[in-house]
Image (tube, rainbow, N blue to C red):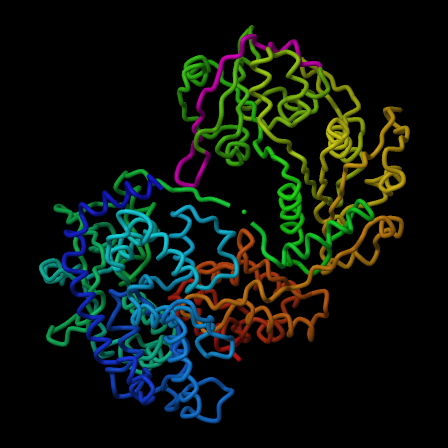
């Protein structure tokens, strides 16, 4: 919270300069809106006073979407979010299909608007019910409530943004499950009311601070002010950026992207359908620039003239200009004189408006990119019910299989169950990993320089690269001195800052020099070292993962004080593996593995314990605590061959019974405190071939798509991921059968429904379509039936990939055309 307050204090100092008279203007706008649409007159409001698309521009929806953006934006997306509107393109009213005509629909909507406003009058009444037409359109609902109750709400309407801001106030994301944007808005308002300096700030100032500080766009919008930047001087002095295509007129006259694009094609600016769509997309991107967005002004392919920030005034159609009448008002941050020279971007001259990744521009300016990293967990009622059922199954049999279509969150549920059970058992769990890092003379650095002094050191990514990228903040590092006669472990450090995509190194902080160094010769012949990642390749690398067995092997060599540092509070009682066709008994239980000799001239074979053997050994040494072993994709392995004789030991009445392992001749048993959870996809036909002996020993729990998890509309869309998934699965049932359905987890991240259009775009393009395309065996007619004909060129048998890289509203309209209703 101190971090948040210090950010607020820094913002406060520059607020007046950044936003000038923003609050005064906001209050005037709000007052004008209330005078135009007083609550006591809403019951008499006519449909033409409400809707977009009519000749009357001064409507309720026009005010909400276009005329009050400084009071929080709901601009863009589909006009369907307003529930009723007039389509000039179709020359008809568009309204919910359950009503006989627009008049009947309007009577219901008008009544529902009043119900919404009245239900939040004192914040003690019941929330609106599902039958209310405003139950799902969150952004519209949120804007209406702020306009009438600015003292009770904040002018923030996007659920994804509200989640981000609440996390900054220390609210864990899991605690937001099941809450709509009104619940989250009220929660954020309450937090601000109880936290200085926000308790004395105007709601618009709070909104500006939160967006400016925590929602910085990852892109600059490259905009060319005419060919060869010929209108730059006018833009610079006028405090705006402008583009042409003046004949299209004021873009706010169009109810949504579809109507605008249709008019753009009608005017045929570019001469071909493809080019018209491309340029319409660029223009729509320009129109949808919002306050706080960053603009980059280019001249040609290799010069940047300026960067700026879009102001509260945003888009305006300036009919008094001779040319380039579409303008967006900008506060210029940097004007480059001479222009900033960059490597030639050969496609820029063909693009008027184009997204440039922020990190790309930062590289051109040689400014480092800094990113923040957020929090995690709590359990929903639905999870609690499922986990109780799974717990009963494990108590009865000791092992369970979660099965169902892909994307139903089976592995996630298994891990969440363990988290839930540990939480219920009040177990303190240690999830820190331990790494071995080698420093030698070639690194130009010695461990002693940071150990005992809490010093820090950046390590640029070397071998093994995936280990560098996998390490997390707080992980422990065993510091190894390499390439010398006294090589070995000399101390302990921790990961101070993990790898992220903005930099190619990790940062390590020293903790302590060991009281007694552990030389290589003391552990080099132990089976634990030989079986480790480092031992298998004889320390050829810089960073290696160390397992629990290796740590336990090392402890006897250490002093009690040093040993204690390697014993962080809590246990790690979960292990996971994935079965596949090459996985075998030797990997799972034990087997002979090749071990190279010291001089690399010969290879010998030694017994190496498998992952499940070692896991059972750990569980046996801690019999009072439950241990959970997860097998992902169990049906993809040769199960009888992998399990061997231990299939018998899984039975509850055989727990603790020893068998003699055939290779090592050692006794082995499965402890009573070991529970096994496996997952399998029903889309894989090999399930039918599953071993009967295994079936008898597992409880099977089906995991099917759960549409309730993903039933919130996204941003300005009039459909939810649940609507999309329901229709996809109906088509898959018809074309492919029950087992080929797909699950809700495709539309979830970290256990929660996705909330941004960008996430939906990526998921649909990179996960959903390729999976269904594989199901359809390149039958593009069938594929079009399932994912939407707007996404497919059935003649050319191609996916229209340009929809995913164009403006959001093109993607929205193509989705809604197929999935709405």
Residue 536 within the magenta-colored segment of the rendering? no
Q: Position of residue 340 (x, y in %)?
A: 19, 46
- Compared to residue 494, the image places residue 230 above or below, namely below
Name the residue rendered at 32%, 61% in the picture. 154
Residue 155: name its quadrant.
bottom left
Quadrant (top left, top right, bottom left, bottom right) of the N terminus: top left
Q: Nearer the viewer, residue 631 or 814?
A: 631
Q: Nearer the viewer, residue 2 or 351?
A: 2
Q: Position of residue 99 (x, y in %)?
A: 49, 90
- Looking at the image, residue 352 sits to the left or right of residue 472; the answer is left
Q: Position of residue 774 (x, y in %)?
A: 64, 62
Number of marks present in the image shown: 0
Residue 524 within the magenta-colored segment of the rendering? yes
Stretch in magenta: 498-525
Q: Residue furthest top?
A: 485
Name the residue rendered at 85%, 29% in the picture. 668
- Compared to residue 337, the image places residue 487 above or below, namely above
Q: Position of residue 634 (x, y in %)?
A: 75, 48
The answer to whether residue 742 is visible is yes
Name the residue rendered at 42%, 61% in the picture. 159
- Compared to residue 90, the image places residue 305 above or below, namely above
- Looking at the image, residue 290 sits to the left or right of residue 299; the answer is right
The answer to whether residue 305 is visible is no
Residue 714: name its quadrant.
bottom left
Q: Nearer the viewer, residue 108 or 265?
A: 108
- Looking at the image, residue 474 sits to the left or right of residue 524; the answer is left
């Amino acid at each position: 919270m101190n971090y948040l307050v210090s950010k607020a204090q820094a913002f406060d100092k520059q607020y007046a300069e950044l936003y000038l008279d923003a609050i005064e203007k906001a209050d005037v706008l709000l007052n004008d809106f209330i005078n135009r649409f007083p609550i006591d007159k809403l019951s008499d409001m006519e449909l033409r006073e409400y809707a977009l698309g009519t000749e009357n521009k001064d409507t309720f929806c026009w005010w909400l979407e276009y005329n009050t953006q400084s009071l929080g934006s709901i601009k863009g997306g589909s006009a369907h979010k307003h529930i009723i509107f007039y389509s000039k393109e179709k020359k008809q009213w568009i309204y919910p299909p359950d009503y006989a005509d627009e008049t009947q629909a309007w009577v219901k909507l008008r009544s529902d608007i009043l119900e919404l406003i009245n239900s939040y009058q004192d914040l003690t009444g019941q929330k609106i019910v599902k039958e209310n037409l405003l139950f799902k359109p969150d952004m519209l609902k949120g804007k209406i409530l702020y306009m009438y109750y600015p003292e009770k709400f904040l002018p923030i309407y996007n659920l994804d943004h509200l989640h981000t801001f609440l996390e900054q106030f220390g609210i864990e994301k899991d605690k937001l499950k099941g809450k709509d944007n009104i619940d989250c808005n009220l929660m954020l308002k309450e937090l601000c009311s109880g936290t200085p300096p926000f308790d004395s700030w105007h709601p618009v100032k709070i909104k500006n601070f939160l967006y400016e500080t925590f929602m910085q766009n990852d892109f600059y919008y490259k905009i060319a002010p005419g060919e060869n930047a010929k209108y730059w001087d006018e833009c610079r002095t006028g405090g705006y950026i402008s583009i042409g295509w003046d004949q299209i007129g004021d873009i706010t006259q169009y109810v949504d992207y579809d109507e605008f694009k249709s008019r753009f094609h009608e005017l045929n600016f570019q001469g071909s359908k493809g080019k018209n769509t491309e340029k319409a997309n660029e223009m729509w991107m320009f129109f949808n620039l919002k306050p706080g967005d960053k603009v980059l002004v280019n001249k040609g392919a290799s010069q940047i003239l300026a960067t700026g920030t879009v102001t509260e005034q945003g888009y305006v159609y300036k009919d008094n200009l001779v040319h380039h009448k579409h303008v967006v008002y900008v506060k210029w941050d940097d004007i480059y004189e001479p222009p900033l020279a960059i490597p030639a971007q050969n496609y820029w001259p063909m693009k008027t408006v184009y997204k440039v990744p922020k990190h790309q521009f930062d590289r051109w300016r040689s400014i480092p990119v800094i990113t923040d990293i957020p929090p995690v967990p709590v359990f929903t009622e639905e999870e609690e019910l499922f986990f109780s059922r799974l717990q009963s199954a494990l108590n009865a049999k000791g092992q369970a299989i979660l099965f169902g279509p892909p994307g139903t969150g089976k592995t996630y549920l298994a891990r969440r169950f363990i988290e839930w059970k540990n939480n219920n058992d009040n177990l303190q769990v240690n999830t820190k990993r331990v790494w071995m890092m080698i420093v030698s003379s070639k690194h130009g650095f010695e461990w002693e320089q940071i150990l005992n002094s809490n010093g820090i050191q950046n390590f640029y990514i070397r071998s093994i690269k995936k280990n560098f990228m996998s390490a997390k903040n707080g992980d422990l590092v065993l510091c190894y001195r390499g390439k010398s006669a006294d090589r070995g472990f000399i101390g302990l450090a921790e990961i101070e800052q993990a790898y992220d995509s903005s930099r190619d190194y990790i940062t390590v902080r020293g903790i302590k020099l060991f009281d007694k160094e552990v030389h290589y010769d003391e552990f080099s012949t132990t089976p634990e070292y030989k079986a480790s990642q480092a031992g298998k390749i004889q320390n050829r690398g810089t960073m290696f993962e160390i397992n629990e067995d290796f740590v336990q092997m090392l402890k006897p060599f250490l002093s009690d004080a040093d040993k204690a540092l390697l014993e962080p509070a809590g246990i790690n009682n979960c292990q996971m593996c994935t079965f596949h066709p090459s996985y075998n008994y030797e990997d799972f239980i034990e087997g002979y593995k090749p071990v190279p000799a010291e001089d690399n001239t010969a290879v010998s074979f030694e017994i190496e314990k498998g992952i499940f053997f070692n896991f059972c050994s750990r569980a046996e040494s801690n019999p009072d605590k439950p241990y959970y072993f997860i097998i992902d994709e169990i049906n993809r392995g040769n199960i009888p061959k992998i399990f061997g004789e231990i299939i018998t030991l899984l039975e509850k009445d055989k727990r603790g019974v020893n068998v003699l392992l055939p290779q090592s001749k050692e006794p082995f048993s499965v402890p009573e405190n070991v529970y096994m959870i496996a997952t399998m996809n029903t889309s894989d036909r090999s399930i039918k071939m599953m071993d009967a002996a295994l079936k008898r020993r597992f409880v099977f729990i089906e995991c099917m798509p759960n549409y309730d998890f993903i039933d919130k509309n996204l941003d300005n869309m009039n459909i939810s991921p649940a609507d999309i998934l329901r229709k996809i699965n109906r088509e898959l049932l018809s074309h492919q059968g029950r087992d080929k359905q797909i699950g809700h987890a495709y539309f979830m991240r970290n256990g929660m429904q996705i909330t941004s259009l960008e996430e939906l775009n990526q998921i649909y393009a990179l996960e959903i379509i390729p999976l269904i395309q594989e199901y359809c065996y390149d039958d593009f007619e069938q594929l079009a039936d399932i994912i939407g004909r707007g996404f497919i060129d059935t003649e050319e048998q191609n996916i229209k990939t340009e929809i995913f890289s164009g403006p959001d509203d093109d993607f929205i309209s193509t989705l809604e055309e197929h999935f709405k209703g």
